[in-house]
Amino acid sequence: MASFVARRRKPELVVPAQATPHETLALSDVDDDMDLRFLQPAIEFFRAVDHGPGQPATAAKLVKAALAEALVHYYPLAGRLREAAGGKLAVECTGEGVVFVEAEVDVSMDDLGKPSPLPPYPCIEELLCEVGDPRVVVGVPLFFMQVTQLRCGGFVIGLHIKCIADLARTGGDASKIVSPVWNREILTARIPPQISPEFVGFLQRLGSTGNDVMLSTPPEEMVIRFFIFGPGDIAALRSHHAPHIFRHQPQASSF
């Protein structure tokens, strides 16, 4: 399995391609959960595509442009989290931008795994940009992305959202994407609260990490397992769809 070191360019902030509203948006009580305050990494691999004659734009250039367009519609991601009294979170839509890093490595897609890369990925830290302490989410960028060019012409995106891919494919045509909906406040408790049965709020901490299995268990005592779902597994799951699902939707999701 390949071992490599990424050559990274200097991180930069990508801001929305157009002016966006400067407002403060409420988050839900679920979003206030202290155990959810971390940055979750994700990686996607893309093989090289023959574009025919002509020199296509680099993957990083295309993705960066699509990211700027996506932030017009997902502009809260370009803002910063603020914490009010009592630990209540909100997003201040400042338009400051998200972190983008362009990188390259001297390996091909096949070096990462055949027929395609599968976890655990080699040198995964080289495919993700530095975020500092991933548990610190207040007052820092909400989205970090690294696009790594491979020797074979393929590329890897460390952290990815669907709207960016859509805009990259459609040349920035926003009419062809699904518009996002915020409405996080729908999941916030009513004032005055109407609770039935009794509910223990997320902000009522235990006072000690000793009662939290995830926080109190040393990493060396944890076990990591990967469950790989290939095309055959997805097809088998899809075959169990109830017939009425296709009444108004003739084709099941290909996800």
Image (cartoon, rainbow, N blue to C red):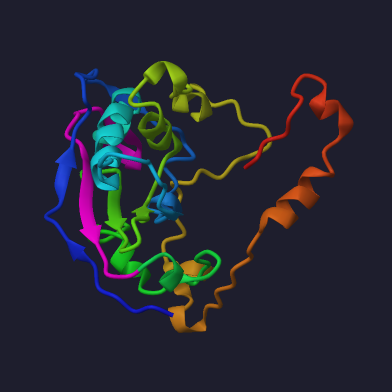
Report the residue at 35% width, 37% height from top. 88
Determine whether, in the image, residue 148 is placed left or right of residue 220. left
Q: Is residue 186 magenta?
A: no
Considering the image in quadrants, where does the N terminus appear?
A: bottom left
Residue 163 position, x and y percent, is: 42, 32
Residue 155 x/y as whole percent: 35, 55
- Residue closest to the eye, 122 or 41: 122
Residue placed most toward the observer, 24 or 122: 122
| Number of residue marks | 0
- Residue 111 is situated, as x and y percent measured from the top left of the image, at 42, 73
| Left or right: 246 as drawn, with respect to 94 | right
Residue lying at the far right in this picture: please name it. 243
Q: Residue furthest front?
A: 53
- Examine the rendered structure and indicate whether residue 211 appears above or below residue 176: below
Q: Give the residue furthest to the bottom.
A: 220
Q: Tell me residue 76's x, y (percent).
A: 31, 30
Front position in the image: 208 or 46: 46
The residue located at (49%, 40%) in the rendering is 30
Residue drawn at the location 40% of the way across and 52% of the way down: 48
Which residue is found at the position 32% from the left and 68% from the top?
125
Residue 102 against residue 90 in the figure, above or below: below
- Whether the magenta-drawn stretch holds residue 88 is answered as yes
Q: Can residue 159 be seen here?
A: yes
Vertical placement of residue 140 versus 94, above or below: below
Q: Is residue 212 visible?
A: no
Question: Which residues lie in the magenta part?
Answer: 81-107
Name the image quarter holding the C terminus: top right
